[in-house]
């Protein structure tokens, strides 16, 4: 599993670059959905970025609210998908 701190650094860069987020740096457990940082379109943009970065395909059944609650949850989803045969 990618360390949460490494993934959170990537995620902070992504939200700043792609979404124009200029708030305080996000932590692994920052409630990004609750903060209103991601809407459905932005989740799809994130999925595309993750698929390109990680060289994987995120199955539709993984696109659920729980997997996008925090940067740590997104990282756990990616790690779980990468571990599948």
Image (cartoon, grey):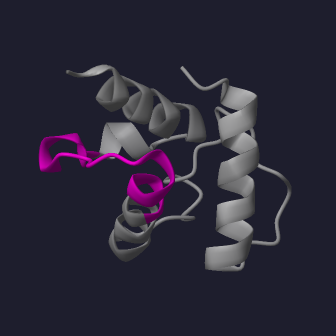
Instruction: Say which residue appears at 73% left-offset and 55% top-offset.
Output: 12
Q: Could you say which quadrant of the image residue 51 lies in?
A: bottom left
Instruction: Say which residue appears at 30% left-offset and 31% top-offset.
Output: 81
Please name whichever residue, 59 or 55, is drawn nearer the observer in this view of the structure. Answer: 55
Instruction: Say which residue appears at 54% left-offset and 40% top-offset.
Output: 70
Q: How many labels, in total? A: 0
Please name whichever residue, 81 or 69, is drawn nearer the observer in this view of the structure. Answer: 81
Instruction: Residue 82: say if magenta.
Output: no
Left or right? Give the position of 70 relative to 26: left
Q: Is residue 47 above or below residue 65?
A: below
Give the position of the C terminus as an image quadrant.
top left
Please name whichever residue, 52 or 42, is drawn nearer the observer in this view of the structure. Answer: 52
Q: Could you say which quadrant of the image residue 83 lies in?
A: top left
Q: Residue furthest right?
A: 24
Instruction: Residue 61: say if magenta.
Output: yes
Q: Position of residue 54 (x, y in %)?
A: 46, 46
Instruction: Say which residue appears at 39% left-offset and 48% top-offset.
Output: 55
Q: Is residue 48 above or below residue 12?
A: below
Q: Position of residue 42 (x, y in %)?
A: 44, 71
Q: Residue furthest left?
A: 61
Left or right? Give the position of 28 relative to 69: right
Left or right? Give the position of 58 relative to 16: left
Q: Is residue 50 above or below residue 81?
A: below
What residue span does the magenta drawing correspond to? 49-64
Q: Position of residue 72 (x, y in %)?
A: 56, 32
């Amino acid at each position: 599993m990618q360390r949460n701190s490494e993934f959170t650094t990537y995620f902070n860069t992504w939200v700043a670059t792609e979404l124009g987020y200029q708030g305080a740096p996000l932590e692994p457990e920052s409630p990004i959905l609750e903060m209103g940082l991601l809407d459905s379109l932005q989740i799809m943009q994130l999925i595309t970025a993750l698929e390109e970065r990680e060289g994987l395909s995120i199955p539709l059944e993984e696109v659920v609210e729980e997997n996008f609650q925090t940067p740590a949850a997104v990282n756990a989803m990616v790690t779980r998908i990468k571990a599948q045969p």
